[in-house]
Amino acid sequence: MEGIPDAAVRIESDGVEFAARDVELLRGVDEHGSLNAASSALGRSFAHAQRRVVELEEAFGPLVERRRGGAGGGGSELTDRARDLLARFDRLQAEFAGVADATLSVLVGEVRAREGELATVEVGPGRVLALVPRDVAVGSTVEVSVRADAVTVELPAESPAPDATSARNRFEGRVTEVVRGEAIGRVAVDVGTETPLWALLTTDSMDRMSLAEGDTVVASFKATATRALAQ
């Protein structure tokens, strides 16, 4: 099973999102014993990591306890609040994975071009870049499948410009169904294909965007998260 994309699982508080990169940073502190060592191991700027911890703590409360130097050498350790936050993230990620396995969008289209393992598939309202097997030729009819946890949904005003994101597949559509769970929700987006495009979101994200049926949104997903198989 593929890993859950960074954009999929996010915990929000006071407008600040705690996401996969933040999980890596806190776990790095826990493993290496200091923010400096963690940022170095992750290949990140210490100053940037320090600013990010401050930003997170303003929204979520104390996360990293700094120890002064001395006989013990100083360093940092996670607070109980940080460990609770990490545990909550793990639960959300597991829930996302379980729901994603049962929620798959399938779009039918024709291969118009291909370059290596990537193919351009015409699906009606636009074109999708997808991974295809080597034996699928140009002109073939294929089924393009996208896991719901790979789809990002944003309001048009908040959506980044196409050249500012790695998500090559991007469609504007209308929300046709909103299904809420305790922590995870599903949203169906009509993008002009025979079947809707499904996306998984945390209920925090759904509430922040006030998503409802009839809303216009931008749905995007990466080519590497998209599979095309011959019918």
Image (cartoon, rainbow, N blue to C red):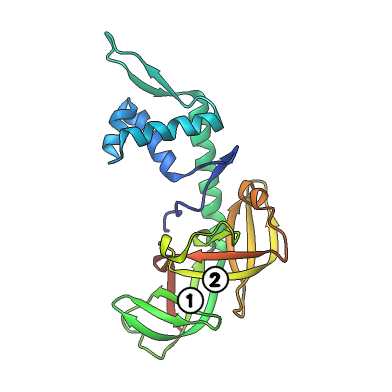
Measuring 45% from the left and 66% from the top, which residue is drawn there? 162
- Residue labelled with disc 2: 171
Residue type, mark 1 in image: Val
Kind of element beneath mark 2: strand
User: Do the residues bearing badges 2 and 1 touch, measured as CB atoms within 8 Å?
Assistant: no
The structure residue drawn at horizontal position 35% and vertical position 88%, both measured from the top left corner, is 137
Judged left or right of residue 178, residue 111 is: left
Reply above or below: 45 against 118.
above
The residue at the far top in this view is 71
Q: Is residue 214 left or right of residue 55?
A: right
Vertical order, 178 against 143 (above or below):
above
**Does 132 sit above or below residue 64?**
below
Q: Which amino acid lies under the numbered mark 2 shown in the image of this protein?
A: Phe
Asked whether residue 88 appears in the rendered view, the answer is yes
Name the residue beneath numbered marker 1.
Answer: 144
Q: Position of residue 84 (x, y in %)?
A: 53, 31
Give the number of the mark in front: 2 or 1.
Answer: 2
- Residue 165 seen in render: no
